[in-house]
Amino acid sequence: MDFDIEKFGYRLIVLMEDFNMTQVELAKEIDISNVTISRYLSGDRTPRLDVIARIASVFHVSIDYLLGISDQKEDSSKNINFDLEIALLAKNLFALDGNVHLSKSQIDLIRKILLANKDFILSA
């Protein structure tokens, strides 16, 4: 499936309106220029995948929704995103001892520990 820049621009406009967010505010939130946001909205520029992911995160929608692949706003891969967030967090924490890669089993173990201690963590 090809990237539909017009649908992306339209959906981005609607999301910005829904969140009462300006181009300048979104640009600051995802650390790009407001001119770049304007070019996305007009269809003059195609966003990189990392930018699309940051936009999806700001508006709490799936990347597939932004790209026009799906009409479902909610991200159905929350567990995958949760695993990625755990991996990135753990990577940053454990980078002090030189461990920069976590295996899937290590990520699963961290997830189980976090979920088992959720009440304690949230109360801290």
Image (cartoon, grey):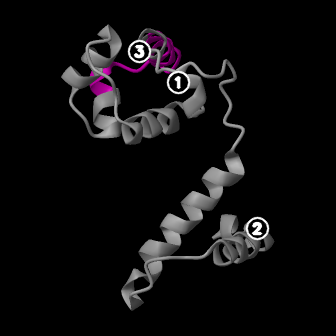
CB of mark 1 within 8 Å of CB of mark 3?
no
Whether the magenta-drawn stretch holds residue 65 is answered as no
Q: Quadrant of the C terminus?
A: bottom right
Residue annotated with mark 3: 5
Query: Where does label 1 land, which residue?
Result: 66
Label 1 – label 2 distance at C-alpha: 30 Å
Image depth: mark 1 or mark 3 in front: 3
Numbered disc in front, either 1 or 2: 1
Residues at discs 1 and 2 in contact (Cβ within 8 Å) = no
Is 19 part of what is drawn in magenta? Answer: yes
The x and y percentages for residue 64 are 59, 29
Q: Quadrant of the N terminus?
A: top right
Closer to the camera in the image, 107 or 5: 5
Residue drawn where x is 41% and y is 15% of the image? 5
Question: Of the residues shown, which amino acid type is indicated by label 2?
Answer: Leu
Secondary structure at badge 2 equals helix
Q: Please give left or right for residue 117 compared with residue 87 in the image.
A: right
User: What label does residue 115 carry, if any?
Assistant: 2
Which mark sits nearer the N-terminus, 3 or 2?
3
Gap in Å between the C-alphas at discs 3 and 2? Answer: 39 Å
Could you tell me which secondary element the residue under label 3 belongs to?
A: helix
Name the kind of residue labelled 3 in the image. Ile
Tell me the residue at 52%/30% (across/down).
59
Residue type at mark 1 is: Leu
First to last magenta residue range:
10-25
Question: CA separation, marks 1 and 3?
Answer: 10 Å
> Is 58 positioned to the left or the right of 82 in the image?
left
Query: Which quadrant of the figure has residue 16?
Result: top left
Percent of width and height locating residue 50: 39, 42
